[in-house]
Image: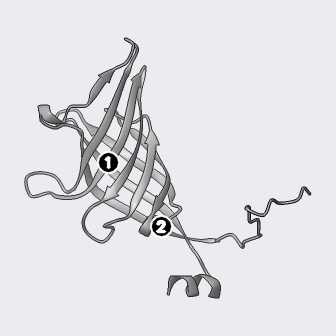
Amino acid sequence: MAAVPPNVEVSIVPAPTTYRKTILRNLWLGRTGDDTQKSLLEVAKFGHYVVVNWTVFEGEGNGAKLVARGQGSTIGAGSWISTYVIVFVDGRFKGSTLQVMGNALGVNGQLAVTGGTGEFALASGIIKVDFDKLTGVDHLTVEVYTPVFLGPCYAAAEN
């Protein structure tokens, strides 16, 4: 084995074997805004690049509560490929994030959850997307798994 440089730390860590499953239902992702919020950029007459700051509501209709924002970008070249962070702005998960990517924009499908912070540290999972063609809104069901770190060294770090 090669020598490890002094600025690199390598150690064996027991991998977590227990995961917390969290399912978030009744979330609605709004991808439209007024004319001041449009962010479409055509690049070199090939495809589109869009910077997004979508809204995520708990529930639908006028009484729905804003709980998060989908912030990132999407590229349209054949299909729409999105990568964004769901930033929770209210409620139990305020301050936590989920990193999301995939090509379920304007269609029914799934997005991959590839990471997160806060309550969703090291998360993995999927987001089921049901697109409502009539309203242009995505109904989301989020299913994520986050490792539960066990043992005295983790308990001490949390205090």
Quadrant for the N terminus in the image: bottom right
- Label 2: how many Cα within 10 Å (few below 14, some 14–19, many 20+): few
Colouring style:
one colour
Tag shown at residue 79 = none
The three-letter code of the residue at mark 2 reads Lys
Residue 14 picture location, percent across and down: 72, 73
- Which is in the foreground here, disc 2 or disc 1? 1
Residue 144 picture location, percent across and down: 46, 60
Picture residue at 50% right of the left edge, 63% below the top: 145
Q: Quadrant of residue 44?
A: top left
Q: Quadrant of residue 102?
A: top left
Q: Which residue position is annotated with label 1?
A: 70
Residue 127 picture location, percent across and down: 41, 49
Picture residue at 35% right of the left edge, 34% below the top: 105
Residue 123 picture location, percent across and down: 50, 60
Q: Which residue position is annotated with label 2?
A: 21
Say left or right for 137 vs 144: left
Q: Do the numbered discs 2 and 1 sit on residues whose CB atoms are within 8 Å? A: no
